[in-house]
Image (cartoon, grey):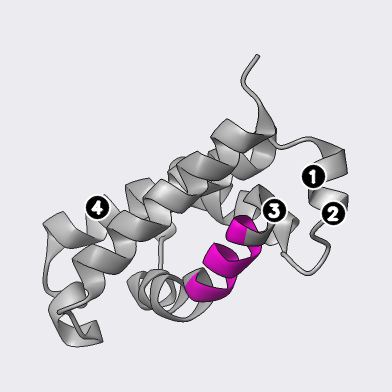
Amino acid sequence: MRSDRLYLADILDAITLIEHWLSASDEDRFLGNELLQSAVLQKLATIGEAAARLSEETKRASQDVPWKEIIGFRNTAVHAYFSVDWRIVFVTAKDDLPALRFAVKRLLG
């Protein structure tokens, strides 16, 4: 079984890639680039999967993080792919990931 530290590192790695990929992109460019959309969505799914595998103890240590929503987002991305709202994906990636990065770094110490 993998440790929470490894799952947190997976989350941090995924955030780093998403931020890199979107650093030179605005919403219109994102919405017009299916490859970028797929890559970002896959890494968001990775974040959700890693979050789902974190222990309850780790989740309780960071109650400011909306773990249920992160996991729910992953479930929608994987199981309801054709109903994905790409604008929500973009806003999530641009606006929500910096706070998650901060929280994960805090948990990693």
Q: Which residues are magenta?
A: 98-105
Label 4 or label 3, whichever comes before in sequence order: 4
Q: Are marks 1 and 2 in contact (CB under 8 Å)?
A: yes
Q: Is residue 22 magenta?
A: no
Of pointers 3 and 2, the one earlier in the residue sequence: 2
Residue 58: image tag: 1
> CB atoms at circles 3 and 2 under 8 Å apart?
yes
User: Helix, strand or loop at disc 1?
Assistant: helix
Q: Is residue 50 left or right of residue 52?
A: left
> Which amino acid lies under the numbered mark 4 shown in the image of this protein?
Ser
Q: Amino acid at mark 1?
A: Thr
Mark 2 Cα within 10 Å, few/some/many (few <14, many 20+)? few
Q: Which mark is residue 38?
A: 4
Q: CA distance from mark 1 to mark 2?
A: 5 Å
Give x and y (percent) for residue 62. Answer: 79, 59
Q: Would you name the residue on which mark 3 appears?
A: 107
Q: For the residues labelled 1 and 4, say whether their Cβ atoms are less than 8 Å apart.
A: no
What amino acid is labelled 3 in the image? Leu
Q: Nearer the viewer, mark 1 or mark 4?
A: 1
**Which image quarter is the N terminus in?**
top right
Distance CA(mark 3)–CA(mark 2): 8 Å
For residue 87, which quarter of the picture? Answer: bottom left
